[in-house]
Amino acid sequence: MDDKHPTRDAAWHLTHSRPGKLLDYLDPCRPLSRQLDTLIRRFNDIQAFCASHNAGEDLISLRNALAFHLVKMSCWWDLAFCPRAVTGVRNPAFLTMVKEHAARSADDEAFLDLFTCQSYIRRGATDHILIIGHDMREPGLLFGLDGQRRFRFTLPGDPADPAWAQSGYRDFTSAWLAAWTCHCPGTGCCATLQQHLHAEREFGWAQRWNRRYFSKPYEKTAVVDYVQACAEASRCRTPFGCMVFGDVINRLAFDVISIAAHQKMTLPEMFSAAGAGDIVADAVPVVELQALSHIDHGLDPQLCPVAFDRPVAEWFSRRRSR
């Protein structure tokens, strides 16, 4: 993320970096990490190209679209996002990119307006709802955002005259899980109503970690965070909860190894320093496998981000050669 030199040219990005190819807002079963990592790296790479070349209007428009979707994904998942910290672009300049994109798309402008000045919706109204999509398997199930910036869903009934559930949710996935619990408790992501209720609770645990996605890993708590997340994951009873936590734990394992590589410490030293020396023998091989899984499934598959960081690249190169 810190590399300032573009790794792909404009033609490549115009073909491979369209948001529609990278993101799926209405499918929470698609892991968060890869979507966000790819979105960030594509934006940063295009921004570096624009800073060092005479970029054409098509590439500038694509950069602006990616900037908008960084904001939208943050709102969608309820993530703490600071443009300058994540992209290196000053917040006013980044917001200009976002607004320039929104001005070219009525749907995106409406979404941005709802989270900012609310010119097109009654400010703060819970009964004025912007429809943002429908479930792919149940077209009659609509999702929306109200004036409180809460995600809502429609109750079972006549699609031509939708009735909205009263509850609102800070992120889309929580609304999606609640909707399937209400609509089809024997289908969706779980087999039974009890499993749906467990999945809602388990996602709530995982969401605490997801909200910190953009935060820089803190070296003094990286191991403690990893151990705590593993303990929470061990309590999951549903495939959905295990899937979401798998994404979280792989990411935290990668953070642990990245810190160890930069500090030139071994994993046993890292765990012992964090007061977790009693689980070193069991944890070390698992952490390495989880971190490798994050590289394979949680990072941009095209821009090879690990290769940009020499200490981390050398660490994983040694592990893969075993």
Image (tube, helix red, strand yellow):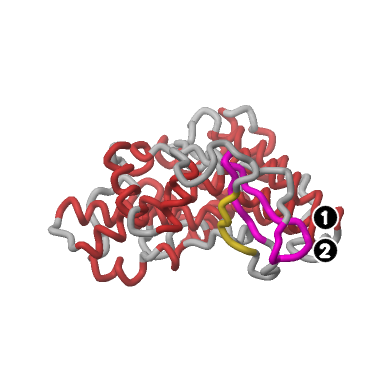
Q: Would you place residue 73 above or below residue 187 in this image?
A: above
Q: Would you place residue 49 above or below residue 267 in this image?
A: below
Instruction: Tell me the SS state at disc 2.
Output: loop
Query: Badge 2, how many Cα within 10 Å: few under 14, some, many 20+?
Result: some
205 lies left or right of 97: right
Residue with the mark numbered 1:
195
Percent position (x, y) of residue 279?
A: 68, 38
**Residue drawn where x is 20% and y is 55% of the image:** 50
Residue 317 occupies which quadrant of the picture? bottom left
Percent position (x, y) of residue 87?
A: 34, 44
Q: Give the dominant element type of the magenta stretch: helix, strand or loop.
A: loop
Can residue 281 be seen?
A: no
Q: Residue 191 carries which label?
A: 2
Q: Which of 89 and 162 is in front in this view?
A: 162
Q: Which of 1 and 163 is in front in this view?
A: 163
Q: Which amino acid does label 2 sit on?
A: Ala
Marks 2 and 1, Cα distance to the nearest angstrom? 7 Å
Assess whether mark 1 and mark 2 are in contact (beta carbons under 8 angstroms).
Answer: yes
Query: Badge 1, how many Cα within 10 Å: few under 14, some, many 20+?
Result: many
Q: Would you place residue 47 above or below residue 136 in this image?
A: above
**Residue drawn where x is 47% and y is 46% of the image:** 120
| Residue that protrudes farthest toward the left in the picture | 54
Instruction: Tell me the SS state at disc 1.
Output: helix
**Residue drawn where x is 44% and y is 66% of the image:** 20
Percent position (x, y) of residue 14?
A: 30, 68
Can residue 24 be seen?
A: yes
Q: What stretch is highlighted in magenta?
A: 142-162
Percent position (x, y) of residue 40?
A: 39, 51
Count of picture labels: 2
Q: Which amino acid does label 1 sit on?
A: Gln
